[in-house]
């Protein structure tokens, strides 16, 4: 018999809610899985992708992961894994580094035999590339009585599916007894074409919608295949406070419900529905923090009626609004020029970093005064100009503003008021067809080249 832990979606490095403690939680959840594996003396730990939350983990996250993997290595328990969409790179993968260090095996078309089971791997593949995908795997070794495919993606017949499991099984050159999956954070198991297909779920809550306890699968390959679920008991507690407000009720009722819970060191998610009066989320979050919560968030799902008085709003060219907001920040001429470069629609995202670095070097060589803060300017100052003013003059003529009322706005987008203050985080940005997110470089991030 061969007995393995099937885990995945550990998302190490995810600083959820911008909390360093939550970032550590994701690594510690992975550590708990490995400690269970050593305590139970399983034959292998199989990871179904998204070991890291993004493709550029910090050095601290890498060091922590290596430390955890060494625990497995010291116990002679192999770590078998595939690459998920969050961590996927165009060149060598982090799993390749861990394999070079003797801490992991990256699964692929060649079988890896553990006990009497042969494991194959299929990394995440974007939808745009699946039509031409060939599910060609090397023959099953004679020493293996069972076969398993480990992959990452949203497979049928589970929620949000975009990958046909029957097609994979039909076109594969190997008859698989089990398919061990990652990507869907909800654990589930189904049978497709006489093959067990299972998701292990995530090891930490990556969103407030993941209310069920986190855990992993135990998969046993014997005369038949048995899949069981084991929960992780040491993950940070989430407290979900659901409040249905009746007509006339307001923030007092919500705060009363929050006080009914022990919130020390927890993540508190307050969801408000029903009728009732408008509430102030900040006051509720402050109450939860004062009672010891690590993080507090309020989701008001009600569609509150508009105020009786019509509010006059102005719709303007968003680029002009951003330029005006940036100009008010008092940045140096160099910073303003770099900002314009980053936001330029004429420059490909892949070329932004190189262009900015080149321009900074030129400015350092030619005009260091460009890095001095801009002179202070008051509203109406005409004799104080900055690079932002010149850039605005060189841009296309702005679209004429149009005054309207909120009742006439319909589905139009309000572009001016908040444009300059919006910040897009790595977690919020969409991935491209290669499954990669374009993340900003951090001082503590590393690339594979750092380990060369």
Image (cartoon, rainbow, N blue to C red):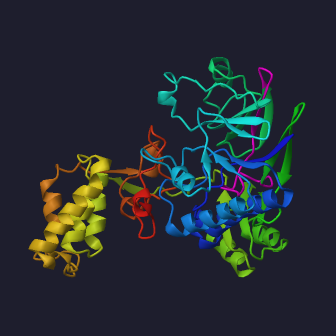
Specify the quadrant that holds the N terminus: top right
Is residue 275 visible to us here?
no
Which is the main secondary structure of the residues drawn in magenta? loop
Is residue 201 visible to us here?
yes
- So how many labels did they put on this image? 0
Residue at (69% x, 59% y) in the render: 73
Residue 103 horizontal/vertical position (percent): 62, 56
Q: Is residue 343 magenta?
A: no
**228, 288: nearer the viewer:** 228
Q: Is the residue 187 above or below the residue 215 in the image?
A: above
Residue 149 horizontal/vertical position (percent): 68, 33
Q: Residue farthest to the right?
A: 223
Horizontal side of 231 relative to 403 (left or right) equals: right
Horizontal side of 92 relative to 269 (left or right) equals: left
For the record, the magenta segment spans 192-214
Residue 169 horizontal/vertical position (percent): 68, 22
Q: Is residue 198 magenta?
A: yes
Residue at (70% x, 57% y) in the render: 205
Residue 20 horizontal/vertical position (percent): 59, 72
């Amino acid at each position: 018999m061969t007995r393995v832990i099937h885990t995945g979606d550990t998302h190490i490095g995810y600083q959820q809610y911008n909390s360093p403690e939550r970032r550590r939680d994701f690594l510690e959840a992975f550590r708990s899985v490995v400690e269970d594996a050593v305590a139970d003396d399983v034959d292998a730990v199989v990871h179904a992708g998204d070991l890291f939350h993004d493709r550029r983990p910090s050095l601290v996250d890498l060091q922590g992961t290596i430390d955890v993997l060494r625990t497995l290595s010291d116990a002679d328990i192999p770590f078998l894994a595939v690459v998920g969409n969050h961590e996927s790179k165009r060149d060598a993968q982090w799993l390749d580094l861990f394999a070079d260090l003797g801490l992991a095996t990256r699964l692929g078309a060649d079988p890896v035999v553990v006990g009497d089971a042969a494991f194959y791997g299929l990394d995440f593949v974007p939808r745009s590339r699946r039509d031409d995908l060939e599910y060609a795997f090397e023959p099953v070794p004679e020493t293996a009585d069972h076969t398993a495919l480990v992959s990452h993606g949203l497979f049928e017949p589970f929620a949000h599916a975009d990958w046909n499991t029957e097609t994979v099984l039909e076109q594969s050159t190997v008859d698989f007894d089990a398919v061990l999956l990652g990507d869907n954070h909800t654990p589930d198991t189904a049978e497709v074409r006489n093959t067990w297909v299972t998701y292990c779920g995530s090891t930490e809550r990556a969103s407030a919608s993941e209310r069920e306890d986190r855990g992993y699968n135990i998969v046993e390959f014997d005369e038949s295949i048995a899949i069981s679920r084991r929960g992780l008991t040491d993950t940070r507690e989430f407290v979900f406070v659901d409040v249905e407000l009746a007509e006339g009720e307001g923030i007092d009722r919500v705060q009363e419900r929050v006080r009914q819970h022990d919130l020390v060191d927890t993540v508190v998610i307050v969801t408000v529905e029903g009728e009732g009066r408008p509430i102030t989320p900040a006051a509720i979050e402050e109450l939860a923090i004062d009672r010891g919560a690590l993080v507090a968030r309020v989701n008001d799902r009600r569609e509150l009626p508009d105020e009786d008085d019509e509010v006059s709003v102005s719709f303007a060219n968003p680029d002009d609004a951003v330029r005006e907001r940036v100009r008010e920040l008092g940045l140096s001429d160099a910073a303003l020029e770099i900002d314009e470069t980053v936001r330029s629609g004429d420059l490909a995202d892949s070329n932004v970093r190189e262009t900015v670095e080149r321009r900074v070097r030129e400015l350092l060589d030619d005009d260091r005064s460009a890095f001095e803060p801009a002179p202070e300017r008051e509203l109406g100052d005409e004799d104080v100009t900055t690079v932002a003013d010149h850039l605005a003059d060189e841009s296309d003529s702005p679209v004429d503003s149009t005054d309207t009322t909120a009742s006439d706005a319909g589905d139009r987008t309000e572009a001016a008021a908040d444009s300059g203050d919006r910040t897009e985080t790595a977690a919020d940005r969409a991935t491209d067809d290669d499954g990669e997110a374009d993340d900003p470089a951090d001082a503590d991030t590393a690339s594979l080249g750092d380990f060369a």
